[in-house]
Amino acid sequence: MAAPRPTVLVTGAGGRTGQIVFNKLRERSDQFAARGLVRSEESKHKIGGADDVYVADIREADHLAPAVQGADALIILTSASPKMKPGFDPTKGGRPEFYYEDGAYPEQVDWIGQKNQIDAAKAAGVKHIVLVGSMGGTNPNHPLNNLGNGNILVWKRKSEQYLADSGVPYTIIRPGGLQDKDRGVRELIVGKDDELLQTDTKAIPRADVAEVCVQALQYEEVKFKAFDLASKPEGEGTPTKDFKALFSKVTARF
């Protein structure tokens, strides 16, 4: 008798990376029962959601219980996202200014919102949480923290630490710069402690990050582990197909 398919909830399923993960799980319906969580009916409609997509505000802890109830795994892909102030003219030089909308600062989304998800998942007996963070968290002076005065990497790292301390089996994935490029044509590289940021290989296609999220659900080796993730340029190295081998290089717990 085959084991029942695990039910996997993807939050941030309306986002650019979250949508790819959600669709991958749906395509592999022989392996997974996919659920998505989005923040609005509009997002639900956009990703073609039916009963498998929940609408909830992650900042409100009590909104999350129905979505995580009965889930075996959770993939967290929610993130605050800075908006560019209008009126920027690239022809005049200088840099655009960014801001976060009220209620959508990193402290509210990347810290409170992710903490709420971790708490809800733990209470519901979820057996594995995959959290997608970001490289750059070891440096409090990272330029991304200045965007809209949001300190986004500081808050992301705080929620990563909270997950690592939660007792729930976890996998923390910290990708480098996200690119909208083809999946499966690059050699993927794992690292730790932002060491990859000192190299020329610090970017990765979103679709490769999405694939790593799904693969992480399938290997015990990657539980209670954290890693940085990047890729070699297309055409260099050998495209990664063996995820067990990739994950076996991961040694850090945080």
Image (cartoon, rainbow, N blue to C red):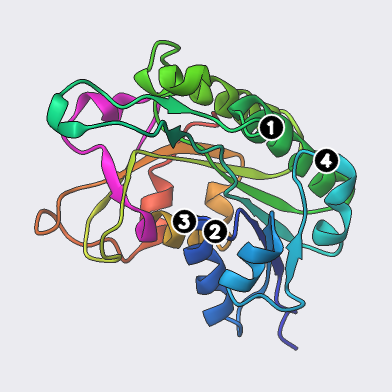
The answer to whether 124 appears left or right of 205 in the picture is right
Viewer-side label of 3, 4: 4
What's the CA distance linking mark 2 and mark 4? 32 Å
Q: Are marks 2 and 3 in contact (CB under 8 Å)?
A: no
**Does residue 129 lie above or below 239 as drawn?**
above
What's the CA distance linking mark 3 and mark 4? 23 Å
Viewer-side label of 2, 4: 4
User: At 57% from the left edge and 60% from the top edge, which residue is drawn?
Assistant: 14
User: Residue type at mark 4?
Assistant: Glu
Viewer-side label of 3, 1: 1
User: Residue type at mark 1?
Assistant: Gly
User: Residue type at mark 2?
Assistant: Tyr
> Range of the magenta residues?
190-208
Viewer-side label of 1, 2: 1
What's the CA distance linking mark 4 and mark 1? 12 Å
Q: Of marks 3 and 1, which one's residue comes earlier in the chain?
A: 3
Q: Of marks 2 and 3, which one's residue comes earlier in the chain?
A: 3
* Tag shown at residue 219: 2
* Tag shown at residue 112: none
Q: Residues within 10 Å of mark 3 (few under 14, many from 20)?
A: many
What's the CA distance linking mark 1 and mark 2? 37 Å
Q: Which residue is mark 3?
A: 17
Q: Which residue is mark 1?
A: 103
Q: Residue furthest left?
A: 235
Q: Residues within 10 Å of mark 4 (few under 14, many from 20)?
A: few
